[in-house]
Image (tube, helix red, strand yellow):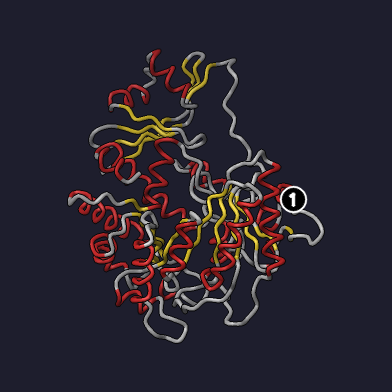
């Protein structure tokens, strides 16, 4: 079992060693600087020498490269502050949905209130102007709801506007999959739209947790959607699975079903949180460690059988540790909602996160007669240090090895559970404290398996 030892900040002549965490596994050690997120894999003797203050010139050079040490008089490594530079946009095109998932916390509507054509054009053109002002930067746009394919025509229109404006965009949708016909699958393929499908497991689990709005079963409709995607040549889609207290004990069966029967290798498993009235479906924090052990053990079993399964949460944390990736807005450098992510609803209201569509977190709207300045919206809102951007009560997090990547966790989750974005999100905190050490152990003791999940 992996163990951690702390290397207290040391002064060795003119070389100053940072406050580091050293994790010991069976085959080696990983040194982590919590303040910079940099890591270094070394042999145990090197880690032991470091703890005793025995630093060779070669090790001193590597430590300074990794921002784990600095020489007196050298320019110190400073953590860069987050700046307003939105690059990922969510367009909430409808609050209508054809499913009635038992754990859904969104206030979805069966009404006819929809985003107008005029509003859609204003939103997409504002995003286009933002990208072009920033030297045509590559942006990500995700269309969601509700169920976005209730307005499949809008999705095609979004891509058309970006093409007309000559904006390079990574366009994606998250869908329940039930409305994917052969025609829609071809449209998604032809327009290079990435797809994530929400499915919770086999027929029994799916029909129990994600029935249609009229209470009928949805599983076979999702299967038809998956088949239509594959027939159209869309092979690289992934799935999103919500693991609840009712399905945790079947996690191995769910993985077998997704991988062996549905032939899906790109998965994302999200644990159900305690939100609103759906508390009976949430997974208690004291079961997170058990859940992760079973998940990793089953993925390893599938790997040994020849299946290279990539689970999104595990993959991201491997990338965080090995290359200090900053490519995830939620899980790579703490919450970057607003700074890098913008969500726009059907009325043109702008939010820093798609999960916080409450009035107190609105940071602007899409104007009628001019372009939206997303950078200024975020800058003005964040400078006030209130609402979604209120300073967090997470001083104790600075002593955590996973500070750089977590920083108190999900602001939206903290708001829904505790009524404020300021406190530490306890579920993300526990999840990271349980998952990261397990991943460090995999990287050190089973590097080929760890690499297969990247």
Counting from the top left corner in percent of width and height, residue 405 is at 49, 44
Q: Is residue 209 left or right of residue 356?
A: left
Frontmost residue, 124 versus 447:
124
Assign the C terminus to one quadrant of the image: top left
Frontmost residue, 415 versus 377:
377
* 365 vs 44: above or below: below
* 64 vs 228: above or below: above
Frontmost residue, 272 versus 319:
319
Q: Is residue 178 among what the camera can see? A: yes
Q: Is residue 287 among what the camera can see? A: no
Report the label total: 1
Frontmost residue, 195 versus 95:
195
The local crowd at label 1, few if under 14, some if 14 to 19, many if 20 or more residues have their Cα within 10 Å, is some
Disc 1 marks which residue? 373
Counting from the top left corner in percent of width and height, residue 126 is at 70, 54
Counting from the top left corner in percent of width and height, residue 156 is at 56, 62
Counting from the top left corner in percent of width and height, residue 229 is at 38, 63
Residue at the spot 64% in from the left edge and 74% down from the top edge? 114
Write down the quadrant of residue 322 in the picture: top left
Q: Residue furthest right?
A: 369
* 132 vs 213: above or below: above
Assign the N terminus to one quadrant of the image: top left
Residue at the spot 22% in from the left edge and 54% down from the top edge? 302
Callout 1: helix, strand or loop?
A: loop
* 382 vs 183: above or below: above
Q: Residue furthest left?
A: 305
Write down the quadrant of residue 344 in the picture: bottom right
Residue at the spot 61% in from the left edge and 56% down from the top edge? 422
């Amino acid at each position: 079992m992996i163990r951690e030892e702390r290397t207290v900040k040391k002064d060795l002549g003119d070389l100053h060693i940072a406050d580091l965490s050293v994790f010991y596994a069976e085959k080696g050690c990983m040194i982590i600087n919590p303040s910079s997120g940099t890591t270094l894999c070394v042999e145990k003797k090197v880690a032991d020498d470091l703890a005793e203050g025995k630093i060779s010139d070669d090790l001193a050079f590597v430590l300074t490269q990794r921002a784990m040490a600095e020489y007196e008089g050298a320019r110190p490594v400073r953590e860069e502050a987050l700046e307003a530079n939105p690059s990922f946009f969510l367009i909430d095109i409808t609050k209508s949905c054809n499913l009635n998932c038992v754990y859904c916390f969104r206030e979805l509507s069966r009404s006819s209130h929809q985003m107008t054509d005029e509003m859609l054009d204003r939103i997409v053109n504002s995003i286009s102007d933002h990208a072009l002002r920033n030297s045509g930067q590559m942006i990500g746009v995700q269309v969601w709801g509700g169920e976005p394919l209730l307005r499949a025509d809008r999705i095609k229109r979004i891509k058309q506007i970006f093409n007309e404006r000559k904006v390079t965009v990574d366009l994606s949708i998250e869908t329940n999959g039930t409305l994917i016909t052969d025609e829609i699958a071809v449209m998604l393929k032809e327009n290079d739209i990435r797809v994530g499908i929400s499915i919770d497991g086999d027929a029994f689990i799916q029909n129990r947790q994600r029935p249609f709005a009229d209470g009928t079963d949805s599983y076979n409709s999702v299967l038809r959607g998956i088949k239509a995607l594959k027939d159209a040549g869309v092979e690289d889609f992934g799935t999103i699975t919500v693991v609840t207290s009712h399905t945790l004990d079947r996690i191995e069966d769910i993985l077998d079903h997704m991988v062996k029967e549905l032939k899906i290798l790109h998965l994302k498993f999200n644990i159900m949180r305690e939100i609103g009235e759906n508390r009976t479906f949430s997974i208690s924090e004291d079961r997170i460690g058990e859940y992760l052990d079973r998940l990793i053990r089953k993925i390893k079993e599938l790997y040994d059988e020849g299946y290279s399964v990539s689970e999104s949460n595990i993959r991201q944390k491997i990338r965080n540790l090995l290359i200090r990736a900053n490519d995830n807005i939620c899980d790579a450098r703490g919450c970057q909602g607003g700074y890098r992510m913008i969500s726009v609803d059907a009325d043109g209201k702008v939010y820093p996160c798609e999960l916080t569509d409450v009035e107190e977190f609105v940071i602007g709207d899409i104007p009628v007669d001019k372009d939206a300045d997303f950078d200024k919206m975020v800058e003005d809102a964040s400078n006030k240090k209130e609402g979604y951007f209120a300073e967090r009560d997470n001083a104790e997090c600075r002593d955590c090895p996973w500070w750089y990547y977590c920083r108190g966790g999900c602001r939206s989750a903290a708001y829904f559970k505790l009524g404020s974005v300021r406190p530490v999100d306890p579920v993300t905190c526990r999840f990271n404290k349980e998952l990261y050490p397990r991943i460090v152990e995999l990287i050190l003791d089973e590097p080929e398996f760890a690499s297969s999940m990247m």
